[in-house]
Amino acid sequence: MSIPTPELTARTAFLRHAGALLAIAGLGALVYGAVGGYGYSVVDDPVYITQNRWVQEGLTLQGTWWAFSNSYASNWHPLTWLSHMLDSSLFGPGAGPRHVVSVAIHLFNAGLLYLLAFRLFRHAFAGAAAALVFVVHPLHVESVVWISERKDVLCGLFVFAALNTYLVYCEGRRKRWYLATFLLFVLALLSKPMAVTFPVQLLLLDWLVLERLQLARSPAARAPGESRRALVEKLPFFAVSLVVGLVTVLAQGDALQAGGHLSAGFRIVNATVSYATYLRDFLLPTQLAALYPVRSIDFLRQFLPALLLLGALAFATFRVRKRTRWPLFALLWFLVTLLPVIGLLQVGGQSHADRYMYISAAGFYLGMAAAVAGLPGVWRPRAVLLTVPVILYFTLLGWIQVGYWASPHKLWTRTLEVAGDTRMAHTVLYDYYVGQNRYEQATLHATALATLYPDTSAGASAMGWIEYRQRRFGSAETWFRRALEKEIGVFPVHGYNLQALAMSIEQQNRPAEALQYYREALNVDPNLVESRRALRRLNTPD
């Protein structure tokens, strides 16, 4: 047998990489091909995009300053705001191009994950299998299709890129690759603060993969200075994480207060159950929803099985660490990266969310690649037979999950089926039926809101809009005033209700009184587009 020439070897490697990347792009396009025709979500997208004056104005110097100096919507992620502004400058107000951009970033992230796996295992098929599962997995649909979650795919872009540059740095110790890793890490934080755990992710790589960090001395241990170097290198990363973490806690003050009624004990119980739920949904993603509200937890049926599952996994992965460290790496990666959003600091009303697994599942994909790459040569054809059905399984479920996001009616009807009664689901479906002029169905959901959440403005506000749409402006005004009595000062609900009241008053030819409420609405939320338009329309200076 003749020895392959270097040119043939390079050509073969190029073809393998190109084939893997084309397969990733093709399968991803198959799953997400329809989203370019989707519209905006009725949840968060108005706050983030369609009703946000800075985003609507496109990329400007003033908008850039606003992005870095404000914690709007209880978030500080300036790079994400700049991304949305750039979309407005390039594509205008339409939703379609924004969807395409998010899908493109997701496909690029899958390519970065492939390169990361290949750098670790030097096995093209193993890397491709991991990246293919990532690109089609239903748990990531929310991050890709929901335009407001651009922060997930953008953060993932910089995290996966930083992991690649870190591996290059570890191979040659060149400072420029260390600086590139640090810069990409900062960009990830500016996209979404969930990247605060990135320094720990690097330490997991050092310890369980690269063996740069020795927790216990052994004959095979590297030079004593290597562990010290690995730790010292992470100090700037931890310092930046600490600063951004504090900024994020301050930015999420209102959202944190919303979950402040939950006891510390309940948060620990909910975190345990959420970890187990994420594991279930990773393997069997057939019951996914847009929102999983916080609910009471049964100790025997939910908490105890979840605790036993996590304990068993921890014990098993620790026991096999001498034969293979990848199961332990995957489990620790999963546990650590979810810590900021697992509910110990409760933000919002969700118990968990699919979008939080966008980066947290990466350890499982790398573990999968390690398992395939570690098979003996005789088993590799069988690995193909085992892997292809897995990829097709997740592809089909991913395609189905993308279909639920085609319209608010599909998505939130599905959410009611999976998660039961939720305020958000009833609100969105009520809003959908109002938009369709199907007021009888809309009233059913408005009544459900008033019944399930009597201490909030949800039901009264919903009835107000039903009356407004039917041009019964006097009745609408009455309902909006009731709504304002329910939730005085709650942002952004209070601002929207003030704006709605102003609109109903304006329609009754009382412009002076309407102006008063438009101004009050802008005092609560300066980014209410309709209120600003009303001030210009009524020839009043901003």
Image (cartoon, helix red, strand yellow):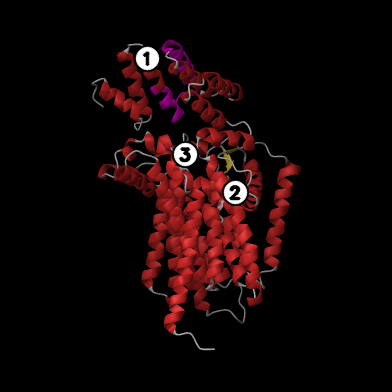
At label 1, counting other C-alpha atoms closer than 10 Å, the crowd grade (few under 14, some 14-19, many 20 or more) is many
Separation (CA) of disc 3 from disc 1: 33 Å
Disc 1 residue type? Answer: Ile
Foreground disc of the pair 2, 3: 2
Q: Earlier in the sequence, mark 2 or mark 3?
A: 3
Separation (CA) of disc 1 from disc 2: 48 Å
- Residue drawn at x 30%, y 23% is 534
Q: Earlier in the sequence, mark 3 or mark 1?
A: 3
- SS under mark 3: helix
Q: Position of residue 141 (x, y in %)?
A: 52, 47
Give the quarter of the figure containing the N terminus. bottom right
- SS under mark 2: helix
Tag 1 residue = 505
Checking the image for residue 397, the label placed there is 2
Q: Earlier in the sequence, mark 1 or mark 2?
A: 2
Which image quarter: residue 383? bottom right
At label 3, counting other C-alpha atoms closer than 10 Å, the crowd grade (few under 14, some 14-19, many 20 or more) is some
Disc 2 residue type? Answer: Leu
Task: Please provide the residue range marked out in magenta.
Answer: 472-499
Tag 3 residue = 253
Could you tell me if residue 51 is visible in this image?
Answer: yes
Pick out the residue farthest to the front. Answer: 1
Q: Position of residue 511 (x, y in %)?
A: 30, 14
Could you tell me if residue 244 is visible in this image?
Answer: no
Foreground disc of the pair 1, 2: 2
**473 part of magenta stretch:** yes
